[in-house]
């Protein structure tokens, strides 16, 4: 187990810059998730940490010691890839124990370690099988077993669940989280799935176009996004962004013919006439009822209702603006209906309309 620091890391492939001055530091035992759209540089950064690829400038330290220039095997890191890359001719037991065999660990000790890891991953009954005789989820476990058995300082995962079906993904997500809690291992985990990022991470690094957009706890990222990209990338349905103009103590919503008070939590001095985007998460809207306390509300037209089970997503309209709401199942709303929706502005975020940076 170890802490990890990525200091001013830059990477170019020829003239193509894919990582731009990345700075991330995590403590021993943290679960860091690198998240961002396809091509943003997640796998490249992971390969650089592993030593499979070389950075153009900057430095990586593990437990305070620079590892730049060290071979992958000298870094004491284990990596689990999206393609499990198991040896098809070897049994599960041989696959898991292979790295220990290569390092000339005595057989008895090796078998004991493999058995411990198999126990942990609940695959003891599969040890004699070949990878071809396993399901996707079982292969995934074997791939993890192969990393675990080495007892490395840091585990690196590159989209390990993306080949699994939706149900198994959720199960394995919980399994990996449990494993992390049990082992207290330091993990760097790449995904483009924002739910995986939110649920697993102790800290999240959101990347876009090779630039680190924000690095923080899941709560930081969700509640205090630094810009429009982070705000809309994390959360589903995405945060609503409503163009507005500051008028006195209110926000005049453009194209919606409506006015809302400036949220009390907005401390930035807002000058008259400033153009902003009001960020509203879908769960901050609710159907206003006669008994509910008075607060800001908007008259909205219900256009589409999407039941998900516990919640319904409602596409609502105010003039030119579409607003998504997440409502509890059973909320009496129907397409075509006009209703008043209460808006909790206590956590609302304002962004500068031109730069997209949170105010
Ligand atoms: N060997 C290479 N030579 C040139 N360009 C490369 C090389 N490897 C990656 N790239 C480019 O670097 C950028 C980042 O790639 P990377 O694989 O790190 O993205 P990613 O965030 O992991 O994406 P995905 O979610 O699709 O896996 C992409 O534009 C990619 O085309
Ligand atoms: Mg990738």
Image (cartoon, rainbow, N blue to C red):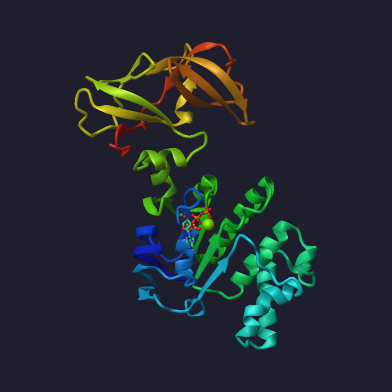
Residue 46 located left or right of residue 131? left
| Residue 243 quadrant | top left
Q: Residue 266 location in percent, x, y?
A: 28, 32
Q: Can residue 171 be seen in this view?
A: yes
Nearer to me, 16 or 224: 16
Image position of 29 with respect to 153: above or below: above
Q: In this view, does 158 lie to the left or right of 142?
A: left
User: Looking at the picture, how far across and down is residue 308, in whole percent?
Assistant: 63, 31
For the point 65% across and 77% down, which residue is it? 113
The reply to whether residue 26 is in sight is: no
Identify which residue, 153 or 77, lies in the foreground: 77
In this rendered view, identify the residue nearer to me: 353 or 6.
353
Quarter occupied by residue 261: top left
Quadrant assignment for the C terminus: top left
Q: Which residue is drawn at 45% across and 62% down?
A: 45
> Whole-percent x and y of residue 231?
41, 39
Residue at the front extreme of this rendering: 15
Name which residue lies at 55% across and 17% down: 303
Q: How many marks?
A: 0
Query: Residue 114 is drawn in which quadrant?
Result: bottom right
Residue at coordinates 51% horizontally, 50% vertically from top-left?
Answer: 38
Q: Is residue 250 above or below residue 18?
A: above
**Rendering coords of residue 89 (x, y %):** 76, 74
């Amino acid at each position: 187990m170890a802490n990890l620091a990525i200091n001013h890391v830059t990477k170019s492939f020829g003239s193509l810059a894919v990582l731009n001055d990345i700075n991330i530091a995590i403590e021993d035992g943290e679960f860091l998730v690198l998240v961002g759209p396809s091509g943003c540089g997640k796998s490249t950064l992971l390969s650089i940490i592993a030593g499979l690829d070389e950075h153009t400038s900057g430095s990586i330290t593990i437990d305070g010691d620079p590892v730049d220039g060290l071979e992958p095997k000298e870094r004491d890191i284990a990596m689990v890839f999206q393609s499990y890359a198991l040896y098809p001719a070897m049994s599960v037991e041989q696959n898991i124990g292979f790295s220990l065999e290569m390092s000339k660990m005595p057989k008895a000790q090796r078998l004991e370690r493999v058995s411990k890891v198999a126990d942990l991953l609940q695959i003891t009954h599969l040890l004699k099988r070949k990878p071809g005789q396993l399901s996707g989820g079982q292969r995934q476990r074997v791939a993890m077993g192969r990393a675990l058995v080495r007892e490395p300082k840091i585990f690196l995962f590159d989209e390990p669940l993306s080949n699994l079906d939706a149900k198994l993904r959720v199960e394995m997500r919980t399994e990996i989280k449990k494993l992390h809690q049990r082992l207290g291992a330091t993990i760097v985990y790449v995904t483009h799935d924002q739910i995986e990022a939110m649920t697993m991470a102790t800290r999240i690094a959101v990347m876009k176009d090779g630039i680190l957009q924000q690095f923080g706890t899941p709560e930081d990222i969700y509640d205090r996004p630094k810009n429009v990209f982070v705000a809309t990338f994390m959360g589903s349905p995405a945060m609503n962004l409503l163009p507005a103009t500051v008028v006195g103590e209110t926000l005049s919503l453009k194209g919606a013919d409506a006015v809302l008070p400036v949220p009390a939590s907005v401390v930035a001095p807002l000058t008259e006439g400033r153009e902003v985007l009001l960020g509203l998460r879908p769960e901050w809207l609710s159907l206003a009822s006669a008994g509910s306390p008075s607060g800001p509300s908007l008259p909205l037209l219900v256009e589409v209702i999407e039941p998900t089970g516990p919640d319904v997503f409602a596409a609502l309209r105010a003039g030119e603006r579409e607003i998504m709401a997440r409502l509890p199942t059973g909320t009496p709303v129907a397409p075509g209906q006009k209703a008043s929706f209460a808006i909790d502005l206590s956590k609302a975020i304002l962004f500068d309309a031109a730069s997209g940076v949170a105010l």
